[in-house]
Each structure stands twice: as C-alpha cells, then as structure tokens.
C-alpha cells in the first residue's frame, strides 16, 4: 500500500491596518514604488486652497492634518509630552516640542542624522505643511528654521493663536452669551452650530471641561426669531430637563 503525505499549504501573514501608511512596518523604503507613493500621498496639500494662517481656519486645518497623520501612519510623532498636538495644542508649549524634536532626531558619531521611522514621518509632515500653507501663513514662522514637522506646527499654532488665560476667558464668555451669537449670524442655525462647535473645540483644546453643556446652546436657540423653531427647542429643552 502506498502512503501519500497530505499537501501542506503555506500562507503569508497578513498585516491588517486602517490605511496603507499604517500597514508599513519599520522604515519607509523610498527605493520602491510603494514607498514613493506613500511619501507623495502623505506630503501632498491638504486642500486646494492653502491655509492662510487665520485663527478662524485653524480648527479645520488641524482636523485635516490629523486625518492625514492617521492615514500616513505618522504615529507617535503626533504627541508632545503625551498630548495630542491636533486636539490638545492649548496644553503644549514650544519648549516641549523642541525637547521632543531633539529626542526624535538622532545623530551618529560623525554628525549625520540617523534615519528612523519618526524622522521620516516628521519630514513628511513638514513637507505637507509647506505644501498646505500660504506664503502669508509661512511668514509667521519665517524666523523658526527647522525641519521637524511637529515642532514647526507648534510654532505656527503659537503664532496664530495667542495661548494664555485671556483666550480661555474669551471663549468662556462667548459660550455664556450664545444669544448674542444667534443675532450675529442673523438667525442662521447652521452658522450658529458651526460657531458653537468651534468655541467648544477651543476650550477643550486647552483642557477646559465644559460644565452644563446644553444650557448655553438652549439659550442661544431661544434667541432665534423663528417661532416654530423656538417651540421645537423648548420641547427639546423640556425633554432634556
């Protein structure tokens, strides 16, 4: 009787990830087509229209950059002192970012920079920022010569957004006076909601907890001129309470 050995099937390990950038393990290999495609996608402009460096457009800009960081697999460079640079930038300072940059960029005995995944990701972020900001915006950091993406971003934010207690007081006052905001946006609810979201984002980015969150928006909604809308809001307020 002849014996037959069962056929063996070899399967390669699949590396599941949310995006191609996250699937790359170790260094990006720019000598390959895949590596070059990843770099090009990571560093391309975030929008057709460059960011102008205004405080009003900062939230949207950081949201787009955060999404790019996730897709590109930039990983740990998006945190400074444990804080997310996109959502908690109000808790950071430039000195912390400078320390992180010194840690991320390492040099050998001859003074040449050692190629690491963090260094590559940082350079991709820096290139993305240069491609995504207007000349006016880049002029805000013209005296800050560096090629570390997160540090450059922290310096840019510090120039765009005056980071002190008066800022928190300003947005806290805005949140308490949403009835004035409703009048300012001419009772346009979509614009009102957008402004409220921006106020909340600015406060939360500074580590401020929002107490009695719904009380203030209700006051703002009740300042609208549409009687049907006001009746609807009062019903929702009753259900909320």
Image: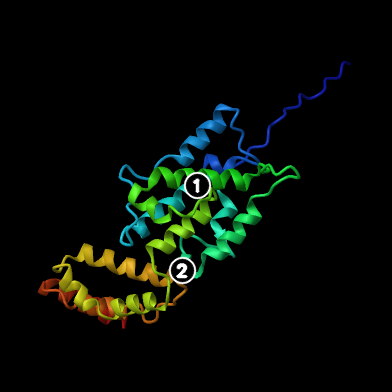
Q: Is residue 155 shown to the viewer in this render?
A: yes
In the picture of the structure, the residue carrying the numbered disc 2 is: 90
Regarding residue 17, the answer to whether it shows in the image is no
Q: Secondary structure at mark 2?
A: helix
- Residue 94 located left or right of residue 109: left
Residue 56: x and y, percent?
30, 61
Residue at 28% across / 63% down in the picture? 194
Residue 208 position, x and y percent, is 44, 76
| Residue 77 position (above or below residue 42) | below
Q: Quadrant of residue 224?
A: bottom left
Q: Residue at x 55, y 50 (%)?
A: 148
User: Is residue 172 shown left or right of residue 120?
Assistant: left
- Circle 1 — which element? helix
The dot on residue 125 is: 1
- Residue 80 — which label? none
User: Tag 2: Cα neighbours inside 10 Å, few (<14), some, or many (≥20)?
Assistant: many
Compared across the picture, whether 154 is left or right of 202 comes to: right
Distance CA(mark 2)–CA(mark 1): 20 Å
> Against 100, is 29 above or below?
above
Judge from the rendering whether residue 123 lies leftward or rightward of residue 237; answer left or right.
right
Q: Position of residue 102 (x, y in %)?
A: 63, 55
Asked whether disc 2 touches disc 1, contact meaning CB atoms under 8 Å apart, the reply is no
Comparing 51 with 74, the one in front is 51
Q: Residue furthest bottom?
A: 241
How crowded pointer 1 is (Cα within 10 Å; few <14, some 14-19, many 20+) is rated as: many
In what quadrant of the picture does the N terminus appear? top right
Residue 114 place in picture, x, y as percent: 68, 43
């Amino acid at each position: 009787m002849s014996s037959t050995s069962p056929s063996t099937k070899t399967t390669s390990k699949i590396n599941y990830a949310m995006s191609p950038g996250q699937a790359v393990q170790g260094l990006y290999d720019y000598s390959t087509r895949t590596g070059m495609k990843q770099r090009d996608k990571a560093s391309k402009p975030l929008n057709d229209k460059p960011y102008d460096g205004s405080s009003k457009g900062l939230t949207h800009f950081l949201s787009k950059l955060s999404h790019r960081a996730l897709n590109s697999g930039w990983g740990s460079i998006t945190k400074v002192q444990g804080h997310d640079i996109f959502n908690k930038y109000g808790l950071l300072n430039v000195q912390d970012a400078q320390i992180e940059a010194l840690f991320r960029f390492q040099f050998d005995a001859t003074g040449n920079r050692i190629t690491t995944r963090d260094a590559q990701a940082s350079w991709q972020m820096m290139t993305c920022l240069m491609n995504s900001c207007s000349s006016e915006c880049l002029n805000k950091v013209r005296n800050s010569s560096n090629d570390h993406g997160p540090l450059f971003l922290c310096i840019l934010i510090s120039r765009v957004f005056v980071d002190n207690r008066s800022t928190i007081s300003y947005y806290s006052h805005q949140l308490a006076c949403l009835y004035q905001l409703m009048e300012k946006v001419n009772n346009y609810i979509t614009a009102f909601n957008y402004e409220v979201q921006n106020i909340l984002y600015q406060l939360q980015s500074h580590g401020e907890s929002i107490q009695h969150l719904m009380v203030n928006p209700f006051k703002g909604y009740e300042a609208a001129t549409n009687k049907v809308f006001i009746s609807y809001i009062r019903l929702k307020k009753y259900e909320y309470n």
